[in-house]
Structure formats: structure tokens, C-alpha cells
Amino acid sequence: MAADPAMRDRLSHMQELSQSNGHVEQMDYAESRESVSGDSFSNVDLEEELPHQAVVWDNTPELEEVFSQSQEVHREVQLIRLEVKRLREQNSLVLQGTTRMSDVKRDSNAIAADIKARAEGVLTCLKDMDAAVRVLEAAHGSNAALTRIARTQYACLSNGFRDANVRLQ
């Protein structure tokens, strides 16, 4: 099958455009490099001027303590949520009237006492975590990775605890 002359013309036209575009791009790049004056910096110059800091992940005892406290508080908050769910189920049994009222009330009181005891323990742990964050800020500065991790853990856990308490109401 013979090639169409119009197609050959189109092909040669595309090749010329491609070559001229490459030449234009090279010229634009050269002009942009020349237009940089002596008091301004190119990206390469800026990168060379900035100090490079290596990020080293170090599992210090302080960080391990933050993580272990966080895991314990998180576990307790999850248990509070489960107990709240159980208390709601008990309260729905009261509304349905399917079991004896004294049994349901006794179970509900036991669940509520367990929730209260767990919540007081979590609140104490959260206060301790907040105090530890303040100590870490004083010792390492507010922008240190350890301090930011501890502060974030405290904020997330206290918000989770607050959410669990809201579900109780």
C-alpha cells in the first residue's frame, strides 16, 4: 500500500515542528538562565545555601513512655465505649419491659459504676500526659519531634475520651 502524499507532507511538517519546538525550548532555557541577575538565586543556588538536616528516628525511653501511655489510654477509652453501648442496651431492655426491673436496674448501676471508675482513671492519665507534654516542651522545645508526637497523642486521646463521654449522655 503506497503512502499518501498528503500524509508524507503532514509527517514532514510534524517533524519540522518537533525540531523547532526543541530548539525554542533550549533557547528559552538559555535565556532564563542568562536573565538571572547576580543578586538573585536559582533553585540550585538556593538548595546549596540551605543547611541539610538528617531526620533520625530514635526510640528514646521518653518516646516509648509516650506510646505506652497512649496505648493504655486508648484501650481504656475503647472499653468505655463498649460499656456505654452495653448500658444503652440495658436501658432499652427497661423500655421493652421484657425482664424484671430490679435485675435490669442492678445491671445498669454496675455498668454505670464501671464506666465512672474507668473514666476517672482515664482522666487522671490524661492529666498526667498533659503534664508530661509540658515537661517535654520545657526540656526539648515546642518544635522537637518528641514534643509534637506527645502533644498530638494527648490531643487525639482527649478528643476520643470527650467523644465517649458525649455518647454516654
Image (cartoon, rainbow, N blue to C red):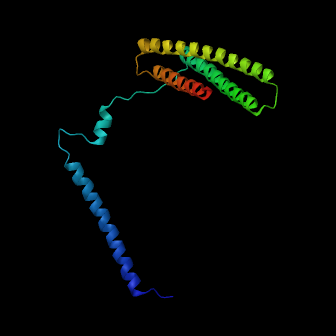
Q: Does residue 65 lie above or below 155 as drawn? A: above
Q: Position of residue 8 (x, y in %)?
A: 39, 82
Q: Residue at x 79, y 20 (%)?
A: 102
Q: Position of residue 140 (x, y in %)?
A: 43, 15
The quadrant where residue 118 appears? top right
Q: Does residue 9 lie above or below 151 as drawn? A: below
Q: Residue at x 32, y 36 (%)?
A: 47
Closer-to-camera residue (140/128)? 128
The quadrant where residue 92 appears? top right
Q: Position of residue 134 (x, y in %)?
A: 45, 13
The quadrant where residue 78 appears? top right
Q: Is residue 44 left or right of residue 152?
A: left
Closer-to-camera residue (113/50)? 113
Q: Is residue 117 left or right of residue 15?
A: right
Closer-to-camera residue (117/52)? 117
Q: Does residue 43 lie above or below 31 as drawn? A: above
Q: Is residue 39 left or right of residue 147?
A: left
Q: Residue at x 20, y 40 (%)?
A: 40
